[in-house]
Amino acid sequence: MGSRTHEVIEDLIYLKARELGYLAEKEKSGPGWCADVLVTKGNEKVAFEIQLSPQTYKETQARQDRFKNSGVTGCWLHLRPYKRLYTDLADLPLFYLSSQNGNHYVNLIDNRKTVLLGDFIKGFLQREIKYCTIAKTCRLQKLRINFIEMACWKCKAINHIYYLDNPYVTSCSFAIDQEEAMWGDDKNAYLPHVLKAVNNILKSPQGSKLRVGEIKKRFSGAVGASYSSFGCYKCDSIFGDWFVMHEELDARNGITPINTFEIEVEADKQLISAYGHWCYPEDKDFCDLPDTNSESKLKTETLDSRYVSTARL
Ligand SMILES: [Zn+2]
Ligand SMILES: [Zn+2]
């Protein structure tokens, strides 16, 4: 991309801001800075900076400080990603440009979202994008539940166990994984909303052939304690976590067949992670909004940021 591209992008931003009814100026300068497009919105000023050539991070920050000193919010659109910049910064709205088939796009730096340039400009100016210091999973979650066959070690009856294989997501498409402990009662698979979803599947015509024993605390001789477990629907023998884990592993690796169901549920737990990010959800459903439904019995669990998944959706 060269200077012609710079001009094209500049025009698109300028025209979009005008179309939205804001005052927009191209190549507007102030003390120590020159904005590609300066947009004035009431007493707020936003400078959109198109950076097609490489610019060091230090330089970007220095230029951002000069905008800040003039009461201007700099919004950076870089063509070249900073390879080692993984997380967003509150003081530096920085996004990446890309082009395909003559269209220009803006990506969030961790690739959570890609939108057309015009939509991004509108989003940024109309506060559909906001910096949030936490990531919080949304209430409605689409669960993918995989059932696998497991023969009872005692009575040999064919049973089914299941596992969840998609992480919980925020309304801005960030995935939060929860590390699970074996022999604990906090397994995702045993959460009340998951049990409810499984029950609904078992009652449905497509799930009526599945045989899932009750999930409850059973004593394990091997562990010397009781823990919530899968067990045989016929003889109620415990299916030890160790064996369940191995069955699950084979299924995850595609060795054993699975029967997958997708079901949307209202989660009774929201995961929160200390992940600062530019939140760009649909309908301004930002991660840091307090829960509107205070009646709900949602349990909120704060996770250490090391639980943050690196998986991208
Ligand atoms: Zn059995
Ligand atoms: Zn968010």
Image (cartoon, rainbow, N blue to C red):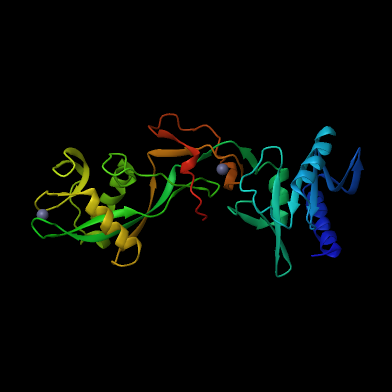
Q: How many marks?
A: 0
- Which image quadrant: the N terminus? bottom right
Q: Give the residue at the far bottom of this rendering.
A: 101
**Does 81 sit left or right of 153 as displayed?**
right
- Viewer-nearest residue: 224 or 240: 224
**Does 152 sit left or right of 253 as displayed?**
left
Rendered location of residue 82, percent (x, y): 69, 52
| Residue at 83% in and 64% down | 2
**Does 173 sit left or right of 39 as displayed?**
left
Rendered location of residue 20, percent (x, y): 77, 48
* Vertical side of 134 occupied by 164: above or below: below
Rendered location of residue 65, percent (x, y): 80, 37
* Vertical side of 216 occupied by 310: above or below: below
Q: Give the residue at the far top of this rendering.
A: 294
| Residue at 73% in and 55% down | 118
Q: Quadrant of ligand 1?
A: bottom left
Rendered location of residue 261, percent (x, y): 34, 59
| Residue at 52% in and 31% down | 290
| Residue at 30% in and 67% down | 255
Whether residue 42 is visible to the viewer of this picture, yes or no, is no
- Viewer-nearest residue: 37 or 222: 222
- Viewer-nearest residue: 257 or 105: 257
* Vertical side of 250 occupied by 235: above or below: above
